[in-house]
Amino acid sequence: MSVLVPRSLSEALDLLRSDPSATLLAGGTDLMVEINLHDRRPRSVVSLSRIDELKTFHVGDDVVTIGAAVPYADMEHGPLAEALPALAQAARTVGSPQIRAAGTLGGNLGTCSPAGDGLPVLAALDAVVHVVGPDGDRHIPFNDFMVGVKRNSLAGGEIIRSVSIPRSDCWQGYAKVGSRNAMVIATASLCLSRSSSSVTVALGAVGPTIIRAIDAESWLADACDLSLKVPSDVASEFADRVAASARPIDDHRSTAAYRRHAVRVLARRLLERSES
Amino acid sequence: MTTAVSTRLRQGTLGTSAVRPDANAKVSGSFAFSSDMWADGMLWGATLRSPHPRARVVSIDVSAALAIDGVSCVITADDVPGQLTYGLIAQDQPVFARIGDEVRYVGEPVAAVAADHPETCRRALAAIRVDYEVLDPITDPEVCIAGTEDLLHPDGNIFREQRVVHGDQSITGEVVVEGTYVIGMQDQAFLGLEAALALPDHDGSGVELYIATQWLHEDRKQIAACLGLPEEKVRLVLGGVGGAFGAREDISLQVHTCLLALRTGRPVRIAYDREESFYGHVHRHPASIWMRHHADRDGRIRRVEARVVFDGGAYCSTSPAVLVNGISQIQGPYKCPSALVESWAVRTNNPPCGAMRGFGVVQACFAHESQMDKLAAAIGVDPVEIRLRNAMETGDVLVTGQIVDDVAPVERCIRETAALPMPPLSPDSDDYRDIPGGSGLTADRRHIRRGVGWGVSIKNLMYSEGFDDYSTARCRMDDGVVTVKFATAEVGQGFVMLAQQIARSVLGVDEVLLDTIDTQIGSAGSTSASRQTWMSGGAVDAACRAVRERLLDLVADRDGLDRSSLTIDDLDITDGLSYRRSVVDAARGLRIDETAEYRHPPTEDLDQNGQGNCHVAFAFVAHRAVVDVDVDLGLVKVVQVATAQDVGRVLNPLSCVGQVEGGIAQGLGLAVMEEIVVADGLVRNPSFTDYLLPTFLDAPEVVATFIEEFEPKSPLGAKGVGEPPCISVTPAIVNAIRQATGRDLPRVPVRPSDICL
Ligand SMILES: Cc1cc2nc3c(=O)[nH]c(=O)nc-3n(C[C@H](O)[C@H](O)[C@H](O)COP(=O)(O)OP(=O)(O)OC[C@H]3O[C@@H](n4cnc5c(N)ncnc54)[C@H](O)[C@@H]3O)c2cc1C
């Protein structure tokens, strides 16, 4: 197995062009598990860790751009956390400090697990994934990027360069349920963003992809004035509708019934939290 | 007899928080665990395992594996020169499954390879062709109890069936409470994975094995039998052990590693990864326990009835002993004049189960402590009061008829636990780390309900039922240099430190060397059953005392002193008058070498009615748990556990606290998260991604106090401290969750959905 360490994005693209089957390595917190535990044997690996461009972020007036290789640790505090509190909250739930020092959003998107903690935030905040590849750049709305369980719409030879998230003064929050108080894969997670006229809600770990509860979102906007406190019965129905949009399964981590229930509780609580 | 007289405690002696000799290396990362071992010219070994819970092995074709470059050998059952099976109690577990025989659990070894690289091993395993005739597994213990023609093994489907009939069988209570309790399969989850290095003798007539184990001599006995070698041709040396908790009592990779080394004539090393470790060792028995308590109107227990089922999985391991431990202490630390217990440990096609910290008592305790809270509710008193009313004292009788003649400070355990400070009602900070759900930010304080729960337990110490459970130690004093040798497995508990403390206290020296822990001395017995402080402590103490007597004899002779007035005082030998010389100095030119064996009083088997003095001694402990519960999401944060533990005497305060904190974390794991999920014989979560252990954010604040009532039966006055901390903490936590939620919660671990759906 060869490991190549390009210093620029264009060098990385060249390497991929000459060997399209090469595997990208960012923090390695998913890939090394695949190799050590699940017998994955890449022939060649292209490491992204020395490409400065991928490791920078920019908080602009209208949009926040985060390089694909920025580690979660950088999202927990500082300017990114101030601009995107929900992302900071999601980042804080990822693994342990060691994992957060290494793991990246690019890797989260590369793996595209329904339980990936960065993903519901990207879905709820209408993020766009910027991709570079042999056939030029692509800008893919997150909600088109993820297409199934651990499946995304990247084509061969493409690299995720960054993610951009529009800035707004919406309230935003993230919550994640797992059966341990830290270092746990989500059994259900939810990101909610609220402006004075609309809410967006995205669900993790309760379906094959991240799910936007579009029906519940538009119902709530019609059912009440979001610049005011949402009446209790409306909040309840909203939570029921969010739960109805989940498509959970039974597995060894939890049951479909619990996951749906948890989504209902989280939707209600985050809506309340947006008013406190 | 002379005794060391000292008014103050010298640092490093008994009673002080002596520093462990392995502490620096472990903390700084330089300690060699067995998975770090290496030898020149070494080959790697790996094991092929059954993917089926039950299947007949039709054929095994290793030719393609042998053809791979770098593969030195492939072995199967045909290559086992000695006994084909092993086991601690019954030798029913095959070294490898034989053609024509059945594999009985997922993970059963079928073949092993030795090759030049782990990657070559992996390919070789993939190239071995095994044809199986897949059979329907039996995974429900009740099928075996009901009786079936379908035998899983020539030894049958029942490891042990045991009744306990005690006292007046006509007694009934004015108040009756009952329930059925289910305990899931817990893993010991030690951090240092199974690893061994075998070095063949040059002439191939024997082998040396470096191994992480709990009991070198028992391993050697079983390995030698399977290798067809005399025991002296198999020498074992303890490799660095990263935790054990019972999972290293049974043979796992020992025989395979030795066979490969003898076959290839080269050093061979096998090291499991985490997934293989889940298949490679036994687990805590899942159990189902029905109990009915009869009490008088004041809540005094008159009679208990129980039906106890332990699923032992595919092979016997220690199942019969685990069962007896559970049922003989099913009344808990309470007075109880009458009992009827039916119990079984059965064979199924589930993963084999055996020893784990608490050894059967964990399961029993979850049942009896759940019952005590039901009884309290039925009588209308609080959980502390019901336990005080029934608290056992020295002289009380177990349901086996055995009189508890130990120090038995149950009431003190409860009262002193109750006196420990409670945590603040609601912390002023809104730090998410203090709230159920933790960093997931699922709840705000107002979603949380608090509960307080109790658990109290009794745990036997040492091996039971007639077992000759001795320990050996040797102490040498050469020119004033003291060296202690024993075969006691240091698995992390700190015996290496305790041995030094004993020698310092008895001999009046500060420097104590420790010899290699290996089979070049008699057995120390197992590092389990909370027994090594008592047993190997007793042996080291006896060997050191023998050296001291001899030293004083020799000094008296040499220096013309009155022997009867010589004592060791602090670091000196003195006659109480004009003679005072440091021990080290006085011992110059002298060579003393003494070996001692320590034995506890004999015990007996239970008879067919479960009566008999089967245990040696007992320790007691109380736990009070304070939990915060997010009732809507079913998430739990254990805020605090308070505990008062009966330890006889604190020999090392820091070590005692370490055992208590660790045990509580392990008991918490069983209460709310740790479970090997098995479906149709398949393990669904053989990794730390899905087998959840408590993290620092899950571990509670621990407030501990020790009850020191010198135990006259114990050589050092101390009781074992290792197991009690993890036993009653589980029901204490669950009782607290019950109090917060009003739910029944008959099963551990309690899952979020058990609380909120
Ligand atoms: C102990 C542990 C705990 C964990 N806990 C969590 C958790 O709580 N929540 C969570 O969401 N995840 C968790 N994970 C998973 C993992 O940390 C995350 O998915 C992380 O975001 C992966 O990032 P990485 O940089 O390490 O990815 P890598 O492992 O380097 O890569 C992952 C995949 O993405 C591809 N990839 C990486 N970068 C790019 C790119 N720029 N363009 C295209 N493809 C790319 C790789 O080829 C690979 O297929 C945990 C992992 C471990 C080991």
Image: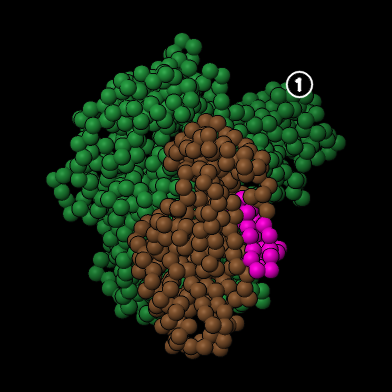
Chain colours: A brown, B green
The answer to which image quadrant residue B24 occupies is top right
Instruction: Count how many numbered circles sit on residues in the image.
Output: 1
The answer to whether residue B560 is seen in the rendering is no
Residue at mark 1: chain? B
Three-letter amino acid code at the position of disc 1: Gly
What is the span of residues highlighted in magenta in the rendered image? Answer: A57-85
Q: Nearer the viewer, residue B549 or A18?
A: A18
Report helix, strand or loop for mark 1: loop
* Residue A63 located within the stretch drawn in magenta: yes
Q: Nearest the camera: B480 or A54? A: A54
Confirm if mark 1 falls within 8 A of ligand 1: no
Residue B460 placed where, x, y %?
A: 45, 52
Tag 1 residue: B589
Q: Residue at x 46, y 35 (%)?
A: A41
Q: Is residue B503 magenta?
A: no
From the viewer's perspective, tell me whether residue B630 is left or right of residue B179: right
Indicate whether B66 appears above or below A35: above
**Left or right position of B105 against B524:** left
